[in-house]
Image (cartoon, rainbow, N blue to C red):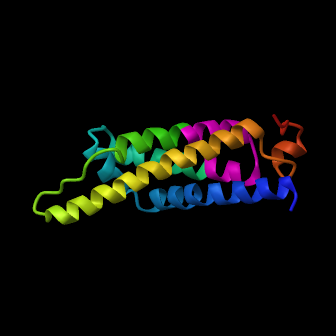
Amino acid sequence: MSQNVIILIGRILLSIIFITSGFGKLTDPAATAGMITNAGWPAATALAYLAGIFELVAGLAVLVGFQTRIASYLLAAFCLVTGFVFHSGVINIPDFPPAANGLLTVFNQIMMMKNVTIAGAFLVLAGFGPGALSLDARVGRAVTA
């Protein structure tokens, strides 16, 4: 399989989570707004919609390979910020059994590591470019490292 096909498959796989998550935030922002509120940030619903728009647009940009390096750097930063802000703490829901809170904390740690890992993949994509099977390549912006 050619390197350009592998990069295309990687872009598709990386974009899926952001396209679906962004669409979900735009159609039902309540859960995200709740997390934003719990983190102590203001304007939670507005931020949930902004996050949804960002994830959808940046995910689509990576999918088609448009402004891929910029989108990749931004998504890497987004993954790190959201990982550290929303997934780095211990979960302690009042009236939940300790074992349930422990399990939720483990899931939260897994989400944190997922975000860090995806950030790393986006940095690789930013560093090496979107490959020949991209809009960037069609307009001459897909210079490889």
Q: Position of residue 28 (x, y in %)?
A: 41, 61
Q: Residue at x 32, y 57 (%)?
A: 106
Q: Main secondary structure of the magenta part?
A: helix
Q: Residue at x 56, y 43 (%)?
A: 119
Residue 132 vs 81, above or below: the answer is below
- Residue 59 painted magenta: yes
Answer left or right for 17 relative to 37: right
Question: Image quadrant of residue 93?
Answer: bottom left
Answer left or right for 130 relative to 54: right
Tally the marks: 0
Answer left or right for 8 relative to 103: right
Answer left or right for 6 relative to 108: right
Quadrant of the snapshot with the C terminus: top right
Q: Position of residue 116 (x, y in %)?
A: 50, 45
- What is the magenta range? 58-76
- Please indicate, yes or no, whether residue 130 appears anywhere in the rendered image: yes
Quadrant of the snapshot with the N terminus: bottom right
- Residue 7 painted magenta: no
Residue 129 vs 104, above or below: the answer is above
Residue nearest the viewer, comparing 42 with 35: 35
Residue 11 vs 141, above or below: the answer is below
Q: Residue at x 68, y 41 (%)?
A: 124
Q: Residue at x 75, y 45 (%)?
A: 66
Residue nearest the viewer, comparing 7 with 38: 7
Q: Position of residue 134 (x, y in %)?
A: 82, 50
- Please indicate, yes or no, whether residue 71 appears anywhere in the rendered image: no
Q: Position of residue 69 (x, y in %)?
A: 71, 37
Residue 96 vs 91, above or below: the answer is below
